[in-house]
Amino acid sequence: MTKKLTSICLLSFIPLCFFSAESALAKDGTFVASEMGRNGEVNVEVTVKDNKIADVKVLDWSETHPVADLPKDSIPKEIVKNQSLNVNNISGATLTSFAIKNAVKKALVKAELNPADFNKKVPLPPKLTGTVKETAQVVIVGAGGAGLSAAVSAAEKGASVIVVEKSHYAGGNTSVAGGNFNAADLQRSAKFEMTAPRRKIVETILSEKPKNALHAQLIDAVKAQLQDYDANNGKKLFDSPEFHALQTWKGGDYQGDLELVYNLTKQAPVLEKDLEKMGFVWRKNSEQVMGSLWPRANRSANYASGVGFIDTFLNEIEKRKLPVKILLNTKAQDLIIKDGRVVGVECLNSNGQKYILTATKGVILASGGFGANVKMRVHYDTIWDKKLGDNVNTTNVPSIQGDGIVMAEKAGAKLVQMGNIQLLPTTDAYTGSSNSKVNISTSVFVNKDGKRFVNETGRRDTISKAALKQRDKQFFIIGTSEASQIDKNGRNKYGVKLEDLVKQKKAFVGQTWDELAQKAGINAENLKQTVKEWNEFCKTLKGDPFGRPSCDPEVRLDGHAPYYATIMAPSVHHTMGGVLINPRAQVLDVHGKVIPGLYAAGEVTGGIHGANRVGGNAVPDALVYGRIAGQEAAK
């Protein structure tokens, strides 16, 4: 064979000779290589046989489920099928797609194959034409937490449901969220003490002059609850749905609709128990997460992020064979209105197929906010001085573009508080993702000078503004080994490997505070002084210069090495404004009247969170109002 190739080379030109000889020397076998993806290294195994790619497998990674599920499955198959690295990326998972292809490229080099020989262009799939018409009793736009909650509740009421989702996966922002679910649950919050500063927070809220009848009613209810708490010599954390409502309303500068807020806080504990019946496994203890203001955030014990809610609803649909059809890669473009009633949705699939979906009972908008739409957030922003352009990252998935808000406004819906845009201070300083933390998000914050600069348990807007004043607009969350959220497999609570975070210089590890400071670029003497002062505060809970009311076990700094620091910066996280709804999740028009046939739930709505969303309230908001919308639309 080699002699024949050499003969051909003599009759041809030298470059062909070089290529052919090199290919002839390629090795059969399996070759492993890796490339950095969005969250960490993507490891692949490539099998080579007879100078061809016989198989590609993704062995291990930290990419986000379900966002990266499709490229993990489809890109290796497409590479083998086409014998090309130049296969099409998966929209919405571009970094993951590139990582798989580049890792395969490195493996081919190990096999002594020339990657340039596997670079033929793979054409896009042919576009379809024509229009598909389908009918269901309820049509839902968006397959995130709100949309799937609505789908399950509508189907439970006996309605047939079609869900349209513009992305290649179901999940939306819920799937990449931390998964914190605020609910007043005294059993799960029992580990927290009712410290004197916490007691003062409650009493301050109860001392306010009522602003309306419901406000007065809630204050009276909490006063009675607190009296019962004292009569029973309460020592553990005090909480209730009514106090949750008062904190949420105050935390949003009283701009939210208190009736909507109370509806949320009353229903959250109910839904918490119902999710458990569906198979969702809760952690034993609540947490106090970034901006939650109180230790009532609950999350999954068997999922690394908010994707647990998504999988629970999808499993429920499949297990019970509920009449729910989900159309992925299908973007809703317009609401169909007939005689003043919303009766359907016009959609376009990414393959070119048009859909006319008729809803005989109702349409539910659950398409999310507009955090990933730079043009919209700059246009509407009233908090951040119009400085939320391309230079500011977002925690949102790319599909969160405000589509539902635009469609609703076109149909006559009233939009409220669109200028209220929230930054999350504790995000990846380079990508905006919220999944790079090693310690809990309310652990101690220090700037590059090694000094604290804010009450870490305060409001998100307050902390973000303080963070933006620090050098390079960055800071660190620090913590000890005991207080870390690294599991036995070396992954954080989002499933990202610590070793990958260290390689990317997003996290730093030291056996001493001096070593940690040196690696992270923090002033060592100031850092050690900060740790000393924090440990002293934790002993007395008095005299914190920033007014922090607590030092719970997960944020103490008197534990053992290794010590951790994760670099953070604020990113656009949540848009509190959107479509105005009533407590039945019906969309209201500019005159305050119900738009027949139209409902909305989740971040597409406005009027609940006000000027500042309390951390941990987004998921229960989406799921509670999704459930309400589904039940109402199915009537």
Image: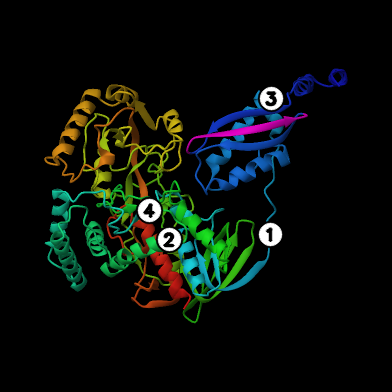
Residue position marked by numbered label 1 in the rendering: 128
Specify the amino acid type for callout 2: Leu
Q: Earlier in the sequence, mark 3 or mark 4?
A: 3
Which mark is in front, 2 or 4?
A: 2
Specify the amino acid type for callout 4: Arg
Q: Is residue 320 above or below residue 540?
A: below
* Left or right position of 155 against 582: right
Q: Is residue 505 above or below residue 455?
A: above
Instruction: State how far apart marks 4 and 1 are (Cα).
Output: 34 Å
Specify the amino acid type for callout 1: Leu
Q: Classify residue 122 by image quadrant.
A: top right
**Secondary structure beneath label 4:** helix
Q: Residue at x 46, y 66 (%)?
A: 150
What secondary structure is the magenta-colored segment mainly?
strand
Tags 1 and 3 in contact by the CB under 8 Å rule? no
Instruction: State how far apart marks 3 and 4 are (Cα).
Output: 49 Å
Q: Earlier in the sequence, mark 2 or mark 3?
A: 3
Specify the amino acid type for callout 3: Ala
Instruction: State how far apart marks 1 and 2 are (Cα).
Output: 40 Å
* Left or right position of 594 against 459: right
**Secondary structure beneath label 3:** loop
Q: Residue at x 39, y 62 (%)?
A: 273
Residue position marked by numbered label 4 in the rendering: 377
**Badge 2 local density, few (<14 within 10 Å), some, or many (20+)?**
some
